[in-house]
Image (spheres, helix red, strand yellow):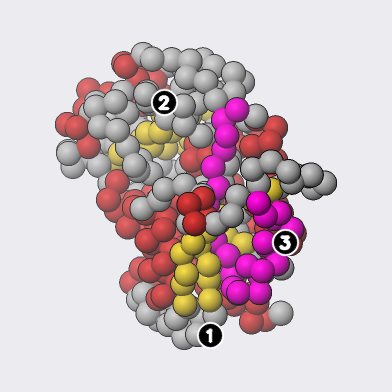
């Protein structure tokens, strides 16, 4: 693996999942693999899970880690190719990226969509320019449109928790929220589950919240949440804003908020959410505090997921 920005960078999802589970059992089994290697983690917005789990993962592999809050502590970056920089941007990505490439052996980067300009957000300009100009492996710590480390942790969690031989029924359900959120977690989860192919996958949301079929192809789209939840083994709850009416909140129907009553028609479904979440807006406290919830296990798996990815990249570079 050279870079990690989506499931398309993964040769075999099941092999990566097995490696991650092996690291979960023995976190220090490869603790010299990254000796002498330094990873920079660049954040353009807040993060708890991604920031901490990736640091733990890198240290488990013997890497040195430096976290840089580029939004607060860095110069404002210009991304436009031929920009005349006479406004508020201070440093061009073409100049900054090679410097980061000189300081680090690998870069993790978290970006965020504007939710104003769909074409720009979905072009993933910053990620693409870092790959082009930094000259070192780039790991997405969540981009404008995808969150692959989260999705890998999600697949690990479903693999661990599903004890039966049959395929699990996995439902991704839209949930209400007070403000517009990115589509990246939903896009990415859909892309990974479809690429994985080991689940009966249903996505449910109000009309107007359709995701690009690049990600959802392979899933059943069901507008009736109750129908979707019938016999579900796993229910992944997530808000996202509209793609078609880009970045807008179109639905304020609180009946989409997940409660124990919603789960009563499921197959004792396990409840998933990437976190952070707003209690009693997206999901009721009663369902979150019930035995159905596996959100802590899911977040815990962010460490072994990140470790498997960083290890794959380190091994690829050793072989080059
Ligand atoms: N799920 C997730 O990425 O959490 P953070 O934003 O806290 O990193």
Question: How far apart in space, not on screen, are marks 3 and 2 (Cα)?
Answer: 35 Å
| Residue with the most extreme front position | 86
Q: Residues within 10 Å of mark 1 (few under 14, many from 20)?
A: few
Q: Residues within 10 Å of mark 3 (few under 14, many from 20)?
A: few
Q: Residue 278 sits in which quadrant?
A: top left
Tell me whether circle 3 and circle 2 mark residues in contact (CB < 8 Å).
Answer: no
| Viewer-side label of 1, 3 | 3
Q: Which mark is residue 36?
A: 1
| Viewer-side label of 3, 2 | 3
Q: Secondary structure at mark 2?
A: loop
Q: Residue 106 sits in which quadrant?
A: bottom right
Mark 3 vs ligand 1: CB below 8 Å: no
Q: Is 157 left, or right, of 211 in this rendering?
A: left
Q: Nearer the viewer, residue 182 or 79?
A: 79
Picture coordinates of residue 52, whole percent (x, y): 37, 61
Q: Which mark is residue 179?
A: 2
Picture coordinates of residue 95, whole percent (x, y): 72, 61
Q: Is residue 97 above or below residue 281?
A: below
Question: How far apart in space, not on screen, are marks 1 and 2 (Cα)?
Answer: 43 Å
Q: Secondary structure at mark 1?
A: loop
Determine if the magenta segment contains residue 106: yes
Question: Which range is magenta?
Answer: 90-116
Instruction: Tell me which residue sits at (71%, 79%) in the image.
Output: 320
Q: Is residue 18 visible?
A: no
Q: Is residue 225 above or below residue 83?
A: above
Which residue has dot 3 on it? 95
Q: Secondary structure at mark 3?
A: helix
């Amino acid at each position: 693996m050279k870079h990690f920005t989506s499931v398309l960078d993964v040769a075999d999802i099941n092999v990566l999942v097995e490696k991650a589970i092996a690291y979960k059992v023995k976190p220090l089994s490869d603790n010299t693999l990254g000796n002498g290697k330094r990873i920079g983690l660049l954040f353009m917005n807040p993060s708890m899970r991604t920031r901490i789990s990736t640091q733990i993962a890198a240290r488990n592999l013997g890497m040195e880690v430096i976290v840089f809050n580029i939004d607060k502590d860095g110069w404002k970056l210009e991304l436009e190719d031929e920009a005349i920089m006479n406004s508020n941007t201070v440093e061009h990505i073409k100049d900054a990226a090679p410097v980061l490439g000189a300081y680090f052996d690998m870069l993790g980067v978290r970006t965020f969509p504007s939710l104003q300009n769909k074409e720009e957000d979905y072009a993933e300009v910053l990620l693409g320019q870092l790959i082009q100009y930094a000259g070192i492996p780039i790991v997405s710590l969540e981009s404008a449109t995808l969150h692959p480390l989260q999705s890998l942790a999600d697949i690990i969690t479903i693999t661990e928790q599903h004890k039966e031989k049959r395929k699990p029924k996995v439902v991704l359900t839209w949930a209400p929220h007070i403000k517009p959120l990115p589509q990246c977690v939903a896009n990415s989860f859909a892309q990974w589950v479809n690429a994985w192919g080991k689940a009966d996958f249903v996505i449910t949301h109000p009309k107007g919240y359709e995701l690009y079929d690049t990600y959802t192809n392979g899933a059943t789209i069901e507008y009736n949440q109750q129908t979707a939840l019938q016999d579900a083994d796993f229910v992944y709850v997530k808000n996202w804003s509209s793609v078609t009416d880009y970045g807008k909140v179109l639905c304020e129907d609180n009946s989409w908020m997940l409660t124990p009553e919603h789960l009563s028609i499921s197959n004792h479904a396990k409840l998933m959410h990437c976190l952070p979440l707003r209690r009693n807006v997206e999901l009721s406290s009663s369902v979150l505090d019930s035995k159905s919830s596996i959100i802590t296990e899911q977040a815990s798996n962010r460490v072994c997921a990140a470790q498997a990815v960083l290890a794959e990249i380190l091994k690829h570079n050793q072989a080059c």
